[in-house]
Image (tube, rainbow, N blue to C red):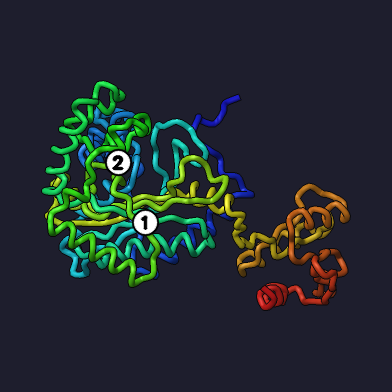
Amino acid sequence: MISIPRGTQDILPQDTPKWRYVEAKLNEIAAAYNYKEIRTPMFESTDLFARGVGDSTDIVQKEMYTFKDKSDRSMTLRPEGTAAVVRSYIENKMHGDANQPIKLYYTGPMFRYERKQKGRYRQFVQFGVEAIGAENPAIDAEVLHMLYHIYSSFGLKSLKLVINSIGDIDSRKEYKDALVEHFTPYIGAFCQDCQNRLHKNPMRILDCKVDKDQPSVASAPKITDYLNDYSKNYYNEVKKYLDRLGIPYMEDASLVRGLDYYTHTAFEMMSEAEGFGAITTLCGGGRYNGLLEMLDGPSETGIGFALSIERLLLALEAEGIELETDERLDLFIVTMPETMNDAVKLIADLRVQGVRADMDYLDRKMKAQMKQADRLNAKYTFVLGGNELETGTVKLKEMTSGDVTDVKLEEIALYLKERA
């Protein structure tokens, strides 16, 4: 037997209604903020992610699914969404659009070769947003408000929004120099990855899962001590907007994002629900100033976030929240051998009129067909026999109450819609 690849999952019919419900709500919220959907390829040039995500990151170093195509070009299944969206923004010259900033959202599978953990898969589905073309604390606050709106709209309560500023490029350069000086005497005790990061991207040492308990990590300089005046003012304005919007947040000077392109506002949304798991992060994001130029684009800035739908569903489960999905069948038609031909035509006409309907295809007895209607959770059922065809009227049974109503065949769809 061929088994499913490790780190992936089948989303079975009993679970897909929850996925559709979540995706529909995410699309609805994005539209309320005037974000437009974008769909990018599932694979891109490897160079896009090496440059856009950062060749010193774990994603590029360890987690990407990379392959050679038939023309010997290196391609990679997308490990995240931002780089691809920015590539499309540049390639399609969206910076020339009269409506600025460009506000986009996406939903789709991403791929990372990482250790399988609760709520984390090697193929996972991300919903993300990107607002490109405005460096303004107000749009940072808009993105954070949307993030908080999303999770609270599902009824989640055990949420913690953590924010920080990692400054502009000038602030980060001074901070990186301070980190190199701080970690150099201790670096021999760190993992090989951190040793490699010391001069390439020392901020990644602060984010290392292996060495997080090293004493020198706790005593490392904080980025907030190295922010220049512009970065401090920008961060303070973001916080003022969050306060005005009534969004609760915590500041964490040690919060750094794992991708090289982040500047200024960085944030994570976490779940504090009991039983959610050791990894509490639901979502992360931040501002990226310079990413477009790294990808040969214009000097524009952006901000965005990406959330895992798998982990959103896990958080709902941890808080005991049931999604109100209505997947009930409108109608089940009980047939007889002599009426099968008419039943096939009737059910086809009803489906065209928007009725969710099914019937028996296994020549089961009437009693077995009624049990099937129960198993399918049908709202209504009726028997289509010779008498019903002759009179043009069926006895439509409401399955919950047992009430029976005479309804003409040509009026069934209207009757059901009026009672939907």
* Image coordinates for residue 114, horizontal then vertical, percent: 41, 32
- Residue picked out by circle 1: 250
Tally of numbered discs: 2
Residue pictured at 25% horizontal, 63% vertical: 102
Foreground residue among 373 and 60? 60
Residue pictured at 23% horizontal, 56% vertical: 302
Foreground residue among 285 and 337? 285
Q: Is residue 143 visible?
A: yes
Q: Can residue 39 be seen in this view?
A: no
Which quadrant: the C terminus? bottom right
Place residue 381 in its image quadrant. bottom right
Q: Residues within 10 Å of mark 2 (few under 14, many from 20)?
A: many
Q: How crowded is mark 1: few (under 14 residues within 10 Å), some or many (20 or more)?
A: few
- Residue picked out by circle 2: 258
* Image coordinates for residue 25, horizontal then vertical, percent: 48, 63
User: Answer yes or no: do the residues labelled 1 and 2 have beta carbons within 8 Å?
Assistant: no
For the residues carrying marks 1 and 2, which lies nearer the camera in this image? 1
In the rendered structure, the answer to whether residue 272 lies left or right of residue 300 reads right
Residue pictured at 30% horizontal, 45% vertical: 254
Which quadrant: the N terminus? top right
* Image coordinates for residue 232, horizontal then vertical, percent: 18, 58
* Image coordinates for residue 300, horizontal then vertical, percent: 16, 57
Question: Helix or strand or loop: what does disc 1 sit on?
Answer: strand
Amino acid type, mark 2: Gly
Amino acid type, mark 1: Met
Is residue 270 depicted above or below 198 in this figure?
A: below
Residue pictured at 83% horizontal, 64% vertical: 383
Which mark, residue 312? none
Q: Which of marks 1 and 2 is nearer the N terminus?
A: 1
Place residue 335 in its image quadrant. bottom right
Q: How far apart are marks 1 and 2 (CA)?
A: 19 Å
Question: Helix or strand or loop: what does disc 2 sit on?
Answer: loop
